[in-house]
Amino acid sequence: VLRSSSGAELLESAGLKLLLAELLPLCDVVTPNIDEAAILTGLPVTNRDTMRVAAERLHRLGARNVVITGGHLSPAEDLLSIRTHAGFEQQTYSSEQLSSPSTHGTGCAFATAVACGLATGSSLRDAVQAAKGYVFAAIRNAYPVGKGRGPIHHLYRLPKEQR
């Protein structure tokens, strides 16, 4: 997370340089949203074409696999970019854009769901598809709580008596 939901920068420029030089090359998968991809690459990321360019730049910076999430785009679209011996394989995942005040935590939930899918033996493509479905359903099933952006419903699949 590079920026809070309220827009506050959470990583100073020295930390960003260190992240790009030291941490990014160690990651099997990075999952920035379009705003984070713009910060990491220094490029405006506003549509499918600029997502592709940003993913390629992240590969050149050392990232093996990149998933740029574009839930704020219309239509909502994510890009998976896999580094191969021949270059890059890229695939987009489109979905309905939900209008919901309960979107706090979507990026963390998505990244965690991808990691869980990989840990249980799914391919990266399948893990991304399952993570998208999970986050979409967690937004759709969220309870409107508090003021402003509320949390997604991480436990929507559990029976009510177990929540």
Image (tube, rainbow, N blue to C red):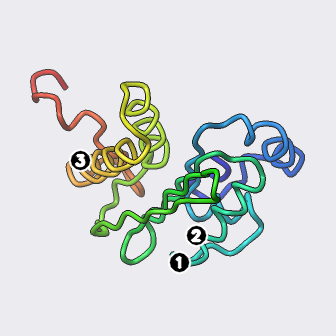
Residue 47 numbered mark, or none: 1
Q: CA distance from mark 3 to mark 2?
A: 31 Å
> Would you call the spot at circle 2 few (<14 residues within 10 Å), some (14-19), or many (20 or more)?
many
Q: Residue at x 30, y 37 (%)?
A: 154
Image marks 3 and 2: residues in contact by CB distance under 8 Å:
no
Q: Nearer the viewer, residue 161 or 57?
A: 57
Residue type at tag 2: Met
95 relative to 136, above or below: below
Q: Which residue is mark 3?
A: 143
34 relative to 106, above or below: below
Q: Residue at x 64, y 51 (%)?
A: 85
Q: CA distance from mark 1 to mark 2?
A: 6 Å
Q: Which residue is mark 2?
A: 51
Expressed as whole percent of the image width and height from the top left, the position of residue 43 reads 73, 72
Label 3 residue SS: loop
- Dividing the picture into quarters, in which one does residue 155 lie? top left
Q: Quadrant of the C terminus?
A: top left
160 relative to 40, above or below: above
> Would you call the spot at circle 3 few (<14 residues within 10 Å), some (14-19), or many (20 or more)?
some
Residue type at tag 3: Tyr
Expressed as whole percent of the image width and height from the top left, the position of residue 105 reads 44, 45
Q: CA distance from mark 1 to mark 3?
A: 30 Å
